[in-house]
């Protein structure tokens, strides 16, 4: 056997995930996801210091692995405004009470309302026809608007409906039927009154009143922190492996959004890769970043680029991990068509190792933390898994039902990809 053959065999033995390593990766990933989704971290949002506690926990993992801080500690602080709902929240229709997160959500930009309001039922014509509009707005005072807008997928119509809803939230409480499942979010601003989205059949044409006990608290200049840890490589250039750790937090004290798939799963992968590269010196400096504020509008990753702890021109690759908890149908790689060489490398490794069912290319999309990097011409890829569960931005995105189906195979793929990166 030649030295070269021996070297290749040794390399492929090191890179191929042994059954033992796969078990270890699956086991630790499960523990990471359990910790990050525990009620004690409050959905890693903006009530009960959920995001702050999650940041502390991640920094502890970095310290335990021996990752170095870029500055005095592992944190990169920044601020943004965020709307929150810290108190008990009650909503009932004609005296029948609804369950938060299951029967209803409040729009993330909701304001406060307390009391019982008679409903004024409105169709699109009532608010879009100029002749009827001022009459409709006039009778709303002291009431709640109940919107009966027909279901549509037309983008222009949806935009128009959205504008009407936002405007009505300046007049009084608004209630509407949810289109499809309840999907919550985070808002950086608040309007004066709440908008309630109701699931199922609880809201009808003949519903007469809504009783609301909803209080929002704006947190101006909320203190958030990205968490950073790095491993020195043999080059001055950097590879950034990022995953956002923030989620939606709590909607009132009753509804918890644990965010297992989104994005405890991505943080678990980032930590698994960090653990490996902390023990196996990489070619490039590897910077592992747990981003804050993604759900609020990619605020943490934008701040990372603005703060310039690492110059954009020095970054060889940014790999963004967001939603990695399934994989039955393989992975999608966003920005693949803009980075064909990097994408082809992933496809080649996957073909050789027979890991995932599919590695699918998608074009550029500003839908997660890779976006602020792409905007500054940093080569970046965003990977998410496909298939399996459909829970997303709802109370059902829980650790108990997160399969982590292809987690170990995806780990093997990404580890090799980062190791042989040219
Ligand atoms: Zn996400």
Image: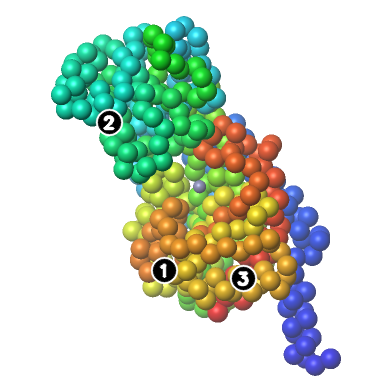
Q: Does the beta carbon at disc 3 come under 8 Å from ligand 1?
A: no
**In this orientation, which residue lies closer to the viewer: 63 or 331?**
331
Q: Residues within 10 Å of mark 1 (few under 14, many from 20)?
A: some
Residue 101: x and y, percent?
Answer: 52, 26
Mark 1 lies on a secondary structure that is loop
Which of the marked residues, 1 or 3, is nearer the chain's N terminus?
A: 3
Determine which quarter of the picture holds residue 315: bottom left
> What residue does disc 3 label?
347
Q: Is residue 10 visible?
A: yes
Q: Which quadrant of the figure contains the N terminus?
A: bottom right
In this view, 257 is above or below 359: above
Residue 82: x and y, percent?
Answer: 36, 36
Q: Residues within 10 Å of mark 3 (few under 14, many from 20)?
A: some
How many numbered circles does the render carry?
A: 3
The residue shown at (81%, 60%) is: 20
> What residue does disc 2 label?
164
Determine which quarter of the picture holds residue 215: top left
Quick check: 344 left or right of 70?
right
Is label 2 or label 1 in front?
2
> Given the current orientation, which residue lies at the most extreme right position?
1
> What residue does disc 1 label?
378
Residue 148: x and y, percent?
Answer: 36, 23
Cα gap from disc 2 to disc 1, whole angstroms? 39 Å
Mark 3 lies on a secondary structure that is helix
Which of the marked residues, 2 or 1, is nearer the chain's N terminus?
A: 2
**In this orientation, which residue lies closer to the viewer: 329 or 224?**
329
Q: Is residue 221 visible?
A: no
Query: Mark 3 near mark 2, Cβ–Cβ under 8 Å?
Result: no
Q: Which quadrant of the figure contains the C terminus?
A: bottom right
Cα gap from disc 1 to disc 3, whole angstroms? 21 Å
């Amino acid at each position: 056997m030649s030295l070269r053959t021996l070297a290749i065999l040794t390399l492929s033995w090191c890179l191929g995930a042994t059954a033992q390593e796969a078990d270890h990766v699956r086991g630790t990933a499960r523990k990471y996801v359990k910790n990050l989704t525990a009620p004690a971290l409050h959905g890693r949002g903006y009530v009960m210091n959920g995001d702050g506690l999650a940041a502390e926990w991640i920094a502890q993992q970095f310290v335990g692995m021996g990752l170095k801080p870029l500055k005095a500690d592992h944190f990169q602080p920044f601020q943004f405004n965020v709307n929150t709902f810290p108190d008990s929240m009650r909503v009932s229709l004609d005296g029948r009470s609804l369950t938060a997160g299951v029967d209803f959500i409040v729009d993330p930009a909701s304001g406060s309302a307390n009391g019982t309001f008679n409903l004024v039922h409105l169709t699109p014509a009532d608010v879009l026809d100029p002749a009827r509009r001022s009459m409709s707005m006039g009778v709303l005072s002291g009431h709640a608007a109940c919107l009966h807008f027909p279901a549509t997928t037309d983008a222009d119509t949806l935009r128009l409906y959205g504008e009407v809803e936002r405007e009505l939230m300046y007049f009084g409480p608004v209630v509407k039927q949810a289109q499809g499942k309840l999907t919550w979010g985070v808002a950086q601003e608040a309007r004066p009154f709440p908008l309630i989205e109701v699931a199922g059949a609880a809201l009808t044409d003949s519903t007469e009143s809504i009783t609301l006990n909803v209080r929002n608290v704006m947190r101006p200049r909320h203190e958030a922190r990205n968490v950073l840890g790095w491993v020195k490589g043999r080059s001055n250039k950097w590879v950034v492996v990022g995953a956002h750790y923030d989620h939606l937090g709590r909607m009132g004290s009753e509804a918890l959004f644990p965010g297992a798939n989104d994005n405890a799963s991505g943080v678990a992968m980032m930590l698994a890769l960090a653990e490996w590269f902390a023990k196996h010196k990489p070619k490039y400096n590897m910077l592992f970043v747990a981003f804050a504020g993604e759900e609020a509008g990619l605020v943490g990753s934008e701040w990372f680029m603005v703060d310039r702890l690492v110059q954009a021109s020095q970054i060889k690759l940014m790999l963004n991990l967001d939603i990695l908890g399934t994989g039955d149908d393989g992975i999608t790689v966003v920005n693949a068509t803009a980075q064909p060489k990097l994408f082809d490398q992933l496809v080649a490794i996957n073909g050789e190792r027979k890991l995932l069912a599919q590695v699918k290319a998608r074009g550029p999309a500003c839908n997660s933390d890779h976006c602020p990097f792409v905007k500054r011409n940093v080569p970046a890829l965003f990977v998410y898994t496909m298939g399996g569960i459909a829970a997303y931005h709802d109370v059902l995105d829980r650790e108990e039902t997160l399969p982590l189906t292809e987690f170990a195979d995806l780990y093997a793929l990404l580890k090799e990809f980062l190791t042989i990166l040219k």
